[in-house]
Amino acid sequence: MTSQAAPQPLTAGQEERIVAKARDLAVGTAQVIPEDGLAEKLRTAEREGRPLRIKLGIDPSGSDLTLGHAVVLRKLRQFQDAGHTAVLIVGDFTGQIGDPTGRTKTRSVLTPEQTRRNARTYMDQALKILREDRLELLYNSEWLAGKSLADVLATSRALTVAQLLERDDFARRHRENLPITLMEFMYPMLQGMDSVAVAADCELGGTDQTFNNLVGRTLQKDAGRDPQIVITLPLLRGTDGAEKMGKSLGNWISLNDTPDDKYGKIMSIGDDLMPHYAELCCEWTADQLDEFCAILARHPMDAKRAIGRRIVELYHGPDEAKAADERFTSRFSRRELPEDLPEFPLPTGSGQADIIEILVAAGLVTSKGEARRLLASGGIRLDGGKLSPDPGPFASEDLAGKVLQRGKLHAVRLVAKE
């Protein structure tokens, strides 16, 4: 029996390139587990002359993607551009269970048809970011649906109930005597089985996925495989700066937004959010982020415009980025609202008009809650003047002909209903 030859040491040049690449790939991440794991995986790839397999699981419970979703997709694209393979796993099997992460109650089960339909819509948007030539798209029903009960029970021996109850969401529900189904308990294990099936070298995810991704390391070790590293990314805060970006809060930027909408929403974020968005949304290298920070220290408005241009450029190209910047400057920096603003007919009847109801009905906000938050932060203007957090009611005749404006991007002209 011949012994396996020891790996050849890397040259000084190879080692220097690996350290630099690991540094760039770590930009914007929350944690690399283990801490030195990324550089070591890159060394393995260099020695073996192969690309790393970078896994990302898709939960197909919804269809619209935001800049928050794009954070992890952008990191996956960075690995592709570095020569590695993106292994995108659609959880059509696990999606029928539903990821319990962050849930306070059991989630509704999706049908296979729903998961496949959502996955198609997801991919249409994800391909605005990912490249197709270094992409494997897989469905985990391909290996999970055929597992026998004996297979599942054998795998389950690697995990304990105590480990599963370490999850914040499970622990909270357990303390509050809220139900946790056995099916939900199995979700992290099934996600970990995906890592074994696709021989993942690395798994990406938000910080809320840390536990699930670490289960993959456990199951790979139990299967006698070289365990994947886990790279987590921060959850992007919404444009309000208060909560994680989400559609229900009205603080999101959609991948399907127009260039002007993307740019305008970026210009509405608070100055304290700029480093956060620059690091997570702009796909800048460590050196480029250093340059951005220097601009931010001297000229904050120029820094914010740089973020807006960069985000539009990533999704629509440099010409659209330049045009969106120029249109914004013309319309808002110079206070030049267009003459052809959409008109909103004021309600008739009592003669009184509620600003919050008008904001919702005119489509300037998605809910009364969002309207109140924007009023409290000074984000709603009437004819250029900021409205108070508790405005009105107004007489309809006093509002006729005035411009109601949300932030610097959305506005309607109020008109008397004929």
Image: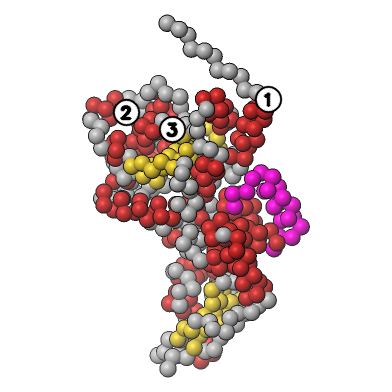
**Magenta run includes residue 229:** no
Secondary element at image label 2: helix
Chain-order first, disc 2 or disc 3: 2
Residue located farthest toward the left when viewing the structure as drawn: 149
For mark 1, give the secondary structure: helix
Q: Are the two marked residues, 2 and 1, in contact with CB atoms closer than 8 angstroms?
A: no
**Is the residue 315 above or below the residue 24 in the image?**
below
Span of residues in magenta: 282-301
228, 398: nearer the viewer = 228
Residue picked out by circle 2: 156
How many residues crowd around disc 2 within 10 Å: few (fewer than 14), some, or many (20 or more)?
Answer: some
Looking at the rendered structure, which numbered label has been put on residue 371?
none
Q: Residues within 10 Å of mark 3 (few under 14, many from 20)?
A: many
The answer to whether mark 2 and mark 3 are in CB contact below 8 A is no
Question: At x 24% / y 34%, what residue is drawn?
Answer: 146
- The reply, left or right, for residue 301 in relation to residue 318 is right
**Callout 2, which amino acid?**
Ser
Residue 289 among magenta residues:
yes
Q: Residue furthest right?
A: 298
List the residue tagged with mark 3. Answer: 200
Question: Going 51% across and 92% down the picture, which residue do you hit?
Answer: 397
Q: Is residue 123 visible?
A: yes
Of the numbered discs 2 and 1, the one sitting upstream in the chain is 1
Tell me, for residue 12, which label it has, or none: 1
| Quadrant where the C terminus is found in the figure | bottom left
Q: Is residue 360 above or below residue 166?
A: below
